[in-house]
Amino acid sequence: MRMGEFNNMEYRDTEERILSGREDYRRIPVPGEMRDRLEAGIARAEAEKRKRSKMGKKKKAGFRIAAAVAAAAALFVVLPNTGADVAHAMGSLPVVGKLFQAVTFRDYQYESDRFDASVEVPQIVAEDAADDAEKAETVEQINFDIEKVTNQLIEEFQASADLGESYGSLKINHETVTDNENYFTLKLSIYQGAGSGYESYKCYTIDKKTGKQVQVGDLFREGSDYNELLSENIKDQMRAKMAEDENNIYWVDYSDVPEWNWKELKEDQNFYFDGDGNLVVVFDEYEVAPGYMGAQEFTVERSVFEEILK
Amino acid sequence: MRSDREELVRRILLDNYESYYRLAFSYVHQEADAMDIVQEGAYRAMLKADTLREEGFAETWVYRIMINEAKEFLRKNRREYETPDENLPAAEQYRDPDLREALHGLPEAERTLIILRYFEDRQLSEIAEILQENVNTVKSRLYRTLTKLRERLSVSA
C-alpha cells in the first residue's frame, strides 16, 4: 500500500485513518444487474454507430442498378391508396408552384406486448418529372435513399421483434417543412426506442430552380465563411440557453471534456427554411447536447446570412 | 467490426465497472441512479471511443466520462439531491463512523479526490489526467482536503 503523499508527519495520521476505510469502501456491494446494464450501454452505442455509418455512406456507384431493382420491387408493394393514386395523378394536377409533393408510399404498423412500430415511408413526386431529367433523377435518388434508410430500420426492428427479446419501438414520419418559391424540403423524423430512445432526422432539400438536391454549403456563395458564421451564431444561442437555465447543457465551451465540443456544421447537416426564410438547423439527439436534452433545432435569422446567399 | 479504440474502451469498461459504480454511488447514494450513471457513461465512452487521442489516456478518460456523467446527473436532478440525506444507506458501512461522516460531509469534488487517491489507489498524475488539472493543482487540493478531514476527525476523536 502506497503511503504518504506528503512527508509532513502532520498528515500521516489522517492518511492512515482514511486508508482504514478503504476495505469498507471496496465492500460497497455492486448489484448483479450492473454488468448487464453496462453491456446494454455498450450495445446501444454500437448499434447507433452501425446505423450512423450506414446512413452516412452514400454509394454513388451501383446506384442506378440498385435503383432499378428497388423500382421493380416497388411494383409489388401494396400501396395505400394515397401513394399510388396521388403519384399517378400528380402529372395532371394544375397546382401552380407545387412542383414537388411528398406522399406516404408505405405504411408499416406493428404491435405486440413489447414491440411497436408506426412507420410512414414517404416518396417525393414531381409534377413534371417526365419532361425534366434532372428533376426526375433528383427525386429518384432521394426516394431511393429514403427507402434504403427506412427498409433497413424496419428490417432491424422486425428482426428483433421476431427474436422477441427485450423490447423496441420504431416511429418514422415525414413532414414537408419547406415549400416556397425556391426550395422544397421533406423532413423525415426517426425515433428508435430500445431501453432509451434515439431521435434522428433526415432533411431532403430540393432547389426548385435547378431541380437538384442541395446541401447546406450549396446555399451560399463560393468562398464565403458560411459555416463559421452559422456555427458561431448557433453557439451563441446555446450559450444563451445555458445561461437561462442551468439544466440546459450543450456541448459548447465544455471544458470538462473539450473533445466533445460541437465544432461546426457537417457537410450533410440537416436544415430547412422556415416560413420567414430563416434557416433552421436540425441536430440529432446527442449531436450537440447530452441525450436527455433530446434532438435540437436552432433557427438562424435570415439577416445573419442574407448577404452571402447565392 | 470494432475499431481498436472501441475494443480498448470496451475492455476498460468491463474491467473497471465496479469501481465506476462505487464512485457513482458516492455521488448519488442510490443503487438505481448509480447504475444509470454507469450505463450512460459506458454508452458515451463507446460512442466517443474514436475521438480518443491516445490509447495511453483511455483509462483516465473513461473515469473522466463517468465523473462527468455523475456530475451531470446531480445537476439534472438537483432538486432531489438538494438536501443531503442524513441517513446513509446500509451499503456504505464504514467501521469508523466518524470517517464515514467526515467523507460524507465533503463536497463531491473533494470526496472524489480522496476516493481516487486512497480507495482506488490512483497516482496523483493519473488523478490530474482524470480531472484535467495539473499535478500541482491536484496536490494542493488534496492537501486542503486532508486538512479539512484532519480537523473534522480530530473534533470527533
Image: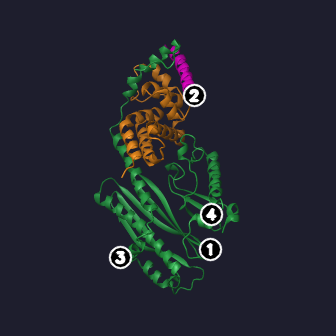
Chain colours: A green, B orange
Q: Residue at x 44, y 37 (%)?
A: B56
Residue depth check, mark 1 versus mark 2: number of the one nearer the observer: 2
Residue type, numbered disc 1: Asn
Do tags 1 and 4 sit on the same chain?
yes
Query: Residue A115, image x and y in percent?
Result: 35, 59
The residue that label 4 is drawn on is A279
Q: Which residues are magenta?
A: B135-157
Q: Earlier in the sequence, mark 1 or mark 3?
A: 3
Mark 1: few, some, or many residues within 10 Å (few <14, many ≥20)?
few
Q: CA distance from mark 3 to mark 4?
A: 37 Å
Is residue B85 at least partly visible in the picture?
Answer: no
The residue that label 3 is drawn on is A73
Secondary structure at numbered mark 4: strand
Q: Nearer the viewer, residue B101 or A103?
A: A103
The residue that label 1 is drawn on is A182
In magenta stretch: residue B145: yes
Mark 2: few, some, or many residues within 10 Å (few <14, many ≥20)?
few
Do tags 1 and 3 sit on the same chain?
yes
Q: Nearer the viewer, residue A238 or A208?
A: A208
Secondary structure at numbered mark 3: helix
Q: CA distance from mark 1 to mark 2?
A: 57 Å
Q: Earlier in the sequence, mark 3 or mark 4?
A: 3
Q: Residue at x 50, y 54 (%)?
A: A285
Do tags 4 and 2 sit on the same chain?
no
